[in-house]
Image (spheres, rainbow, N blue to C red):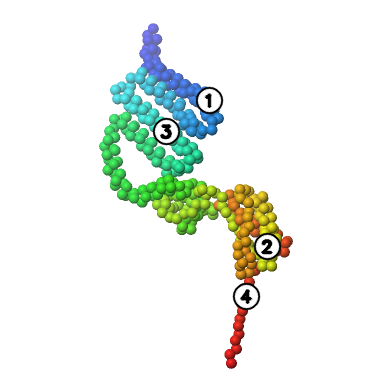
């Protein structure tokens, strides 16, 4: 009998923790059940819809649903356990802090995901590093203030200090802030966006890879990466080849002899152009090649063949293919491409 009493006395402290542990385990199991069955059905339903925003919301909640059930069950379990005067309060504050952080992460995923969806359908608010960074800073700053307030730390002096210190920081970081607002100005004015091919007044040209906090990176066709401060870029003259329509006009100048039959030249040149039009995928199919005679030059009659490439850079492929085919065809048709000729008349006057 004494042995049974001593065994119960030894087991009693552990039995007090049995109910809270079971509560947490059951809560986590319910969370997994909720995620596996209910949320999986919601996700399969959202995958069938054309709107991508519901996928963003469900994916954001799906990553946190088990953790929230764990926090809820842990909070219920701790209400039935007496840890002592300060420890119960600390435990509740920690649970609330983790809840706020998890909600902030979920809100960040939802807002950034919606921004990506919105930017694909409407270019008025592009999804770039600047806007994503500002959104994250805003969300997590608010979460940090809420957590401080939950721990009993007054945030009023902190806000006052940030307001006063913000003026000093803005003066010290004048160039950085200038680049930041320069980047925002570039995005809102829509002068360029990520993926555009641009040419700057200083001669640099390439694809815009990223518009960041301070620098915009441009990748040249030679694969070199150029970093340009946003304040400099927003104040410079730039040419955007793909902002409105990526199609790129490709004019090719050709000269033929004055003895050539221009109707025959036109027919042969258009046949070669039609072959290039049909063979090359980089040639825009919305624009048929055209020929225009332009001038009586010093030693030839010059004309232009006009193609249209799908995007900047296609002109190199079109030029290479057309010049080779046209040169070969002109040789077969005995059409002369003359060398530049200059006639010099020398007058020799003998004075006696």
Q: Which label's residue is closer to the chain start, 4 or 1?
A: 1
Q: Which label's residue is closer to the chain start, 4 or 3?
A: 3
Determine whether 165 is above or below 14 in the image.
below
Instruction: Residue at 61%, 79% (x, y): give it.
Output: 345
Residue at numbered disc 2: 262
Q: Which label's residue is closer to the chain start, 2 or 1?
A: 1
Which quarter of the picture shows residue 263?
A: bottom right
Q: Which label's residue is closer to the chain start, 3 or 1?
A: 1
Label 4 with label 1: CB-CB less than 8 Å: no
Q: Secondary structure at mark 1?
A: helix
Please count the marks in the image.
Answer: 4
Q: Which label's residue is closer to the chain start, 2 or 3?
A: 3
How far is the residue under mark 3 from the one under mark 1? 22 Å
Label 2 with label 4: CB-CB less than 8 Å: no
Q: Which label's residue is closer to the chain start, 2 or 4?
A: 2
Mark 4 vs mark 1, foreground winner is 4
Residue at numbered disc 3: 107
Q: Secondary structure at mark 2?
A: helix
* Percent of width and height locating residue 127: 46, 41
Residue nearer the viewer, 29 or 119:
119
Residue at numbered disc 4: 343
């Amino acid at each position: 009998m004494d042995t049974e009493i001593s065994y119960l006395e030894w087991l009693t402290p552990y039995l007090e923790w049995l109910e809270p542990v079971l509560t947490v385990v059951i809560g986590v199991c319910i969370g997994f059940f909720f995620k596996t069955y209910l949320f999986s059905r919601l996700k399969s339903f959202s995958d069938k819809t054309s709107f991508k925003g519901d996928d963003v919301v469900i994916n954001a909640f799906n990553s946190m649903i088990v953790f929230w059930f764990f926090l809820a069950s842990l909070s219920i379990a701790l209400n039935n356990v007496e840890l002592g005067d300060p420890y119960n309060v600390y435990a509740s504050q920690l649970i609330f802090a983790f809840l706020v952080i998890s909600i902030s992460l979920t809100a960040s995923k939802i807002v950034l995901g919606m921004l990506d969806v919105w930017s694909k359908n409407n270019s008025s608010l592009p999804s770039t590093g600047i806007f994503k960074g500002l959104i994250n800073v805003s969300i997590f700053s608010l979460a940090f203030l809420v957590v401080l307030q939950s721990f009993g730390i007054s945030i009023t002096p902190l806000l006052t200090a940030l307001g006063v210190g913000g003026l000093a920081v803005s003066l010290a970081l004048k160039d950085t802030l200038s680049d930041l607002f320069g980047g925002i100005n570039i995005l809102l004015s829509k002068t360029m966006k990520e993926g555009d091919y641009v040419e700057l007044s200083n001669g640099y040209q390439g694809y815009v890879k990223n518009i960041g906090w301070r620098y915009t990176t441009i990748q040249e066709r030679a694969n070199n990466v150029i970093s340009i401060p946003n304040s400099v870029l927003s104040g410079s003259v730039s040419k955007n080849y793909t902002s409105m329509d990526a199609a790129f006009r490709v004019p090719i100048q050709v000269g033929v002899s004055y003895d050539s039959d221009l109707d025959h030249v036109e027919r042969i040149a258009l046949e070669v152009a039609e072959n290039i039009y049909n063979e090359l995928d980089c040639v825009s199919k919305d624009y048929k090649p055209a020929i225009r005679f332009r001038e009586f030059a010093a030693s030839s009659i010059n004309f232009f063949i006009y193609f249209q490439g799908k995007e900047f850079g296609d002109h190199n492929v079109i030029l290479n293919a057309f010049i080779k085919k046209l040169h070969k065809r002109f040789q077969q048709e005995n059409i002369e491409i003359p060398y530049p000729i200059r006639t010099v008349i020398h007058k020799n006057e003998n004075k006696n």
